[in-house]
Amino acid sequence: MSERVIAPKSRGFLFLDSHPGGCRQLVDEMWQAVPAPVTAGGEGPVALVIGSSAGYGLAATIAGLARVGIRGIGVCFEKAPARRTGTAGWYRTAATARLARQHGRDMVFLNGDAFSDTVKEQVADLLAERFGGRLDFLIYSVAAPRRTDPDTGNVYASVLKPIGSPYTTKTLVFDEYGAPEVKEVTTAPAEGDDIEQTVAVMGGTDWERWITFLADRSLLADGFTTAALSYIGSPLTAAIYRQGTIGVAKSHLEATAHTLDERLGKTLGGRAVTSVNAAAVTQSSTAIPGIALYVGLLRGVLGDAMVAPIGQLVELWDQLTGARPLNLDDEGRVCLDTWELDPAVQNAVAERWSTATSDTITELADLDWFSDEVRRLYGFSVPGVDYTAPVETDVPWPTLTI
């Protein structure tokens, strides 16, 4: 037992510890936000969620369990409790596994490097031995700083850089007293092999490798469907995102979807798509210059009309399973971001962006909401949690038994 009181301590948007009780309550909230299951009784489809512990991958896991009744495997890469607490994803995974058991869902979670063939072998073995040797769905939601190529051993590192020229943008920061400041930051352009390295990490190479790996072992069911989660975003952030190094990687991901879709259609009557999700506060998005300011302003414009990740992933599962028609754009993407990119919304955000300063930001953006959302990523600012009480931090990773 290692109970202690955990106070939120941060460096910018990065928190040093996570709160197990808050993470558990947050997962409970997400599960409760999912509408009633679309099917009743019987065994649900077998699904693999790669990147299951955070952001949209976590939402995909919980929405799949609660809405569709999936069973299967979640893969993520989290740190166990030690001198500090475990990572928030460690505690969220434990909480998700607990709810899955309570609802009779056979969901196994593996902690390891999803880029490695070792983890792919573990998944393949589990699918063969535990889940009848078939996989119906694969959701790919990986945001990582680096990737080791299993064939060559080369290590690639992704970067967030514009292409061609430096990029200067407004960004939102908070000083040591928590006061908001709007500053300008400049990011140097990509150089050398920055673009190729980023594509090697964040493009479609590993997604395709997963499909090939499992197909070679005859583990993909007839009608197998896979979706990789992506983002386009606003013109306000395009230079650093969609037109930058990450944008090239996302384009590679979408090209991979077309290749996989043709292949799966011919061999299994299946399909592959990318799902373009909308803006949210995630551990990945807060690292991108300008995104914090943009999301705060977006919330200021939309308020509760913003659709949370769990709501977006319910919509995606409904489309993938046929509960609703599959709604694709001209590029073959499932677009869950139409509410964000509505011209009236974008015009309103752009107007606020142009006048945002340290003096005006509290009037233009919903900073209380934004600050709470950042803290909730680590299990803080979750209603119903007593943060003055000691909490057990040594939470075990969920076992394989159900």
Image (cartoon, helix red, strand yellow):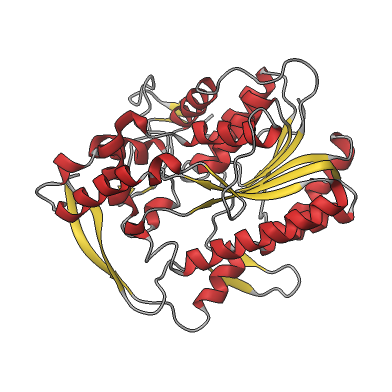
Residue 117 seen in the current view: yes
Along the line of sight, the residue nearer the viewer: 273 or 371? 273
Q: Which image quadrant for residue 254? A: bottom right
- Who is closer to the viewer here, 393 or 15? 15
Q: Residue 212 at what x, y percent from top left?
A: 81, 58
Q: Residue at x 46, y 28 (%)?
A: 26
Question: Is 41 left or right of 129, judged from the image as shown?
Answer: left
Height in image: 40 above or below 268?
A: above
In the rendered image, the vertical position of residue 85 relative to residue 36, given as above or below:
below
Q: Where's the C terminus, which quadrant? A: top right
Q: Quadrant of the N terminus?
A: top right
Residue 160, position as x, y percentages in the image = 43, 66
Q: Residue 89, relative to residue 384: is it above or below?
A: below
Q: Which residue lies at the image location 57% right of the left edge and 69% below the top edge? A: 199
The image shows residue 255 at horizontal and vertical percentages of 64, 63
Measured as percent of width and height from the top left, residue 15 is found at 37, 46
| Residue furthest left in the image | 359
* 385 left or right, relative to 143: left
Residue 396 visible in the shown view: no
- Total count of labels: 0
Outermost bottom residue = 192
Q: Is residue 321 found left or right of 9 in the rendered image?
A: right
The quadrant where residue 263 appears: bottom right
User: In the figure, residue 354 lies in which quadrant?
Assistant: bottom left
Question: Does 287 sit left or right of 400 as displayed?
Answer: left
Residue displayed at 79% across by 43% down:
224
